[in-house]
Amino acid sequence: MERILIVEDDAVIASGLVYAFEQEGYGVVCSKSVSEAASAIMNERFDLAILDMQLPDGTGFDVREKLGSADTAVIFLTVVDDEGNIVRAFESGADDYITKPFRLRELLARVRRTLNTRSPDGRLSALTIGGVTVDTAAGKAYIGENLLDLTALEYRLLLTFASNKGQMLTRSQILENIWDSSGNFVEDNTLTVYIKRLREKLCDAVNIETVRGIGYRVD
C-alpha cells in the first residue's frame, strides 16, 4: 500500500482529503503543522507528501526540507499562486504545485500520475540522448557514471525527449506525455519551469532546442 502524508491545517479540507485517498486504497497520515509532520516523517517512510504552503508553525517548504530524500514525491497544495513561490517549489524538488480551490478528481489524477512516474515502465532497458543514458528499468538517468538528481516529472520530460530524438515536439505533445493522454490537468507555464530546470541539470550533455512559438527538439 502506498503511503501518503497530508499536511493541512484546515480541518475540513484535511478530512475530505483523508477520506478520498483512503477510498482510493492509499494509506494516509494527516498532520496539521510542521512539528506534527516532522514526527510522522521520523516514524515512517512516505511515497508522497501533499503539503499546504501556509502552516501555523512554518511553511510547506519547512516540511519539504524535513522529508530530505528525493524518494518521497511532493505536491504543494496552496492558495499561494504567485510565480516566485511556484518557481521556488519546483526548485526545491516538488513534483507538482496545485492552487486552491481545486477539483478533487484533478488532484487524485495528479497524485496517480506522480506516483506512477516514480515507477519503472519496463518498456526499454536504456535510452541514450546526447551524453545522457536513461535507464528506464531503474527509472534513473546518468551523465557518464554520474547519477542525475531529477524529480519525477523532470525524469519523465527527459524520457519524452529521449524517446523522440530528432523530432519537433509541440508543447501540447510534451504536456500530454508528462500528464495524462488527454492533456488534462496541465498548466502550460509549468512546462517552461521544468525545461529551464532540466537544462540546468543536463548542462552541456544534451541540447534542448527551443522552436519558437511551437515547442522543443532534441537531436
Image (spheres, helix red, strand yellow):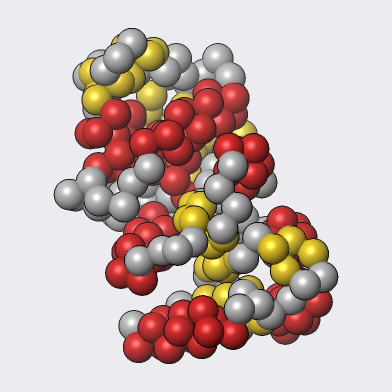
Q: Is residue 113 above or below residue 3?
A: above
Nearest the eye: 101 or 59: 101
Residue 86 visible in image: yes
Residue at horizontal 25 percent and vertical 42 percent from the top: 176
Tell how many labels. 0
Residue 25 visible in image: no
Residue 156 vs residue 72: left or right? left
Residue 48 placement (x, y as % from top left)? 53, 68
Q: Is residue 128 above or below residue 90?
A: above
Residue 39 placement (x, y as % from top left)? 77, 81
Residue at horizontal 23 percent and vertical 46 percent from the top: 183
Residue 94 placement (x, y as % from top left)? 57, 51
Q: Quadrant of residue 84?
A: top right
Assign the N terminus to one quadrant of the image.
bottom left
Assign the C terminus to one quadrant of the image.
top left
Q: Is residue 128 above or below residue 217?
A: below
Residue 200 vs residue 65: left or right? left
Residue at horizontal 53 percent and vertical 84 percent from the top: 12
Nearest the eye: 151 or 95: 95
Residue at horizontal 46 percent and vertical 80 percent from the top: 17
